[in-house]
Amino acid sequence: MNVEFRSSVNSDELAVAAAKLVQEAALAAITEKGCFTLALSGGRTPKKMFEQLVQPQFSNFPWQSVLLFWGDERFVPPEHAESNYRMARVSLLDALPVAPQAVYPVDTMYSSAVEAAEAYETTMRHVFPSEAVQNGWPCFDCILLGLGTDGHTASLFPGTAALEEGFRWASVGHAPDGSQRVTLTLPVLNAAKLAVFLVSGHEKAEIVSTIATGSGEDFPAAKVQAENVIWLLDSAAATACRLAGVCL
Ligand code: 6PG
């Protein structure tokens, strides 16, 4: 596993750096095997990156060969303000000049999050390129991830069953506020070729530094051991790291 920390001056530069990194990974994957499997993260941070991806600078992004999934989704209707799919649709998908080859949002209209997670796994097992399933796990070319101040990533929260799931591709995440989510499981995150953490803001600086110094190994985000893990931070999120002299 290769781990790298990169710092950008601010959240706007971070968004551009993230868009460039994903475009680079997409072009390489598509040149090599004709498609790019990408899982989007949710929350607020990736919105600026999605808005960058629809700018003229990224007009060559090969969306026509991208299979798009979500790393996690809140168990709310697709047009709910909290929906990760809605955020991506409004800030990215509706503005793309070229539609992705395929878009697979989590269907959250089931009567329970358990059914939604099972259905998402069934969909993934059906559509994920079979040549990219290794040792029983889907190997995403790229998974975007965020980081909570409690060290969660995707919807894998500390001390929850989803974090311990070792067989399913998707499970039910339980957030501290009691809300339910559908999330990819840790083995899926770890099977990825590239995991990109996108982290912005002073409030994340401490948890980033704790994980970067290796003293946070119990946090879910620290358990992500994809082939390549790149942490993209803005200067605010990298503050404690720099002070600790551990990265950047
Ligand atoms: C979600 C995310 C979650 C998010 C972090 C950071 O659905 O909320 O997938 O893991 O990435 O909580 O969220 P912010 O970007 O809003 O700080």
Image: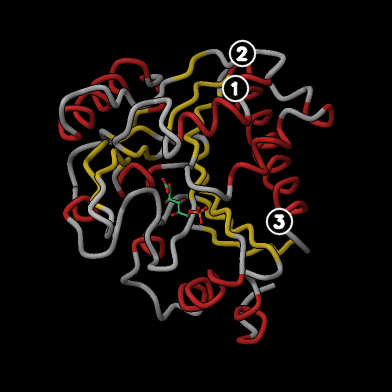
Residue, disc 1: 93
Residue 233, how many percent across, how many down? 64, 62
Say above or below: 37 vs 209.
above
Residue type, label 3: Ser
Q: Secondary structure at mark 1?
A: helix
Question: If you read the primary sequence from the N terminus, does the residue marked by circle 2 or circle 3 appear first?
Answer: 3
Residue 85, how many percent across, how many down? 46, 30
Task: Find the residue positioned furthest to the right.
Answer: 56
The structure residue drawn at horizontal position 22% and vertical position 42%, both measured from the top left corner, is 172
Residue type, label 1: Leu
Side of 62 relative to 216 (left or right)? right
Residue, disc 3: 11
Side of 239 relative to 229 (left or right)? right
**Front: mark 1 or 2:** 1
Mark 3 Cα within 10 Å, few/some/many (few <14, many 20+)?
Answer: many
Residue, disc 2: 99
Residues at circles 1 and 2 in contact by the CB criterion of under 8 Å: yes
Judging depth in this view, the residue of 101 and 10 nearest the camera is 10
Say above or below: 85 vs 82.
above
- C-alpha span from label 2 to label 3: 26 Å
